[in-house]
Image (cartoon, rainbow, N blue to C red):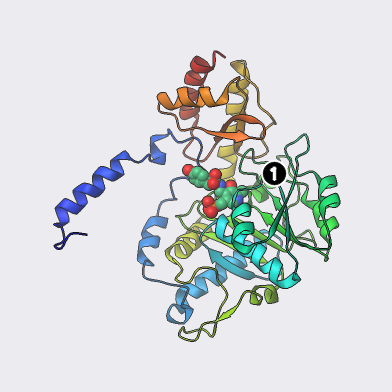
Amino acid sequence: MEEKGASFEKAMEELEEAHGKDFLFEDGRVLGSMCTKPMDGSVDVHCKFIESNLGNPGLYPGTKQLEERILSMVSSLLHGNDFHGQVQAGGTESNIVAAWVARNVSGKNEVVYCENAHFSMLKACDVLRMKPVEVGLNENFEMDVGEVEDKITDDTAIVVASAGSTELGAIDPIEQLSDICGDKTFLHVDASFGGFVIPFLEELGYPTRPFDFQLDGVSSLVLDGHKMGMSTIPSSVFLLRKEEDLRSIAVESPYLTSLHSTSLLGTRSSAGVAALYFAIRTLGREGYREIVKKCMENTMYLASEVKRIGLGVPIEPVMNICGILVDDPAKVREELDGKNWKVSMSRHPDCLRVVVMPHVTRQVIDSFVRDLEDVSGG
Ligand code: 0PR
């Protein structure tokens, strides 16, 4: 650190330079991100609440109220009768907290998760010193329910299912998992990506399956505001069926305005809470349904274009993520990178993967497919 601060102009020049190197969603080259440009207005709201810290809620009763209203609105979207939980910093924090709560409530130590679950579950196991128990996939790239049954033991603390897998957007058979777990084992649904998509898919007539609190065995669920929630980074909504479960992670917090702290983080960025409130209030179900409708139409268009140029898809898209089968995915990805396309890869199966977020428009798809055809020899 320099002794004397730089001038405003100098610091801004450095920041502009750094910003200029970053990819922006509006440029339409980022095809592998689950985030998108936050909706108009949410960034202003974010900045307005930049001082709020829900780690010390007594000072920010207004922001605390917004958090409670988010929990209530999202809970009603997901068939919850009541609203317990927290707005957190993203799927990773929420997945760690889910495992933490399950371990403390049950006194057990094993985490049953699927091989395509998000890697945050491995972080959770490592941080919490819980034992990871991996199960495989069925032919639709969903969690193999038979294997879950085989692998549940007396020491199973939690089963983790995905509702919208990171790789292909697959929805695990949560109805069956709910029956298997019942009230014996904690069942956490990672709907970080799918939580703001699946309820609207159903209303739009796409085939889908139950994944939320309408299933009695579902104990907790996360959905991310900074993914299809259309809001700013960071925000995720972590919902729990039973309020008392959250108390299992409480520690005394004598120098705060609340007697206990029940969050993983101490100081909590609350700008994301306000921005998500804005997104949910102004979009409403109608607004989200419209966004999902466009993303799904574009996803189906991409899948049909991929087939038209002679390539395949591993599964028909379940939500707005499309896998693309090519002979040598790593090589094709590199060549696409050379043409300035930021595409990501899936390991189950080994393929390219495009997340059709709102910034991935039909023009973007047309231009991408032309380059894909070139580099894949499709
Ligand atoms: N659960 C699922 C199903 C996810 O897809 C993700 C993130 C998480 C949990 C973790 O969420 P946070 O990253 O909010 O903690 N999935 C993407 C990933 O890690 C996120 C992502 C976003 C990747 C933007 C790239 C990117 O540019 O692959």
Query: In which image quadrant can residue 69 be found?
Result: bottom right
On screen, 372 above or below 251? above
Percent of width and height locating residue 55: 47, 74
User: Looking at the image, is 104 positioned above or below residue 373?
Assistant: below
Q: Is residue 1 above or below residue 138?
A: below
Residue at 58% over, 16% down: 309
Q: Is residue 95 left or right of residue 234?
A: right
Q: Is residue 343 above or below residue 5?
A: above
Residue placed at 53% from the left, 63% from the top? 88
Q: Return the x and y of residue 47 as percentages of the image width and height.
A: 35, 62
264 or 154, which lies in front? 154
Q: In the picture, which quadrant includes the N terminus?
A: bottom left
Which residue is the site of mark 1? Answer: 115
* Residue at (59, 61) in percent of width and height: 127
> Quick one: quadrant of the C terminus?
top right
In which image quadrant can residue 8 be found? bottom left
Mark 1 is on which residue type? Answer: Glu
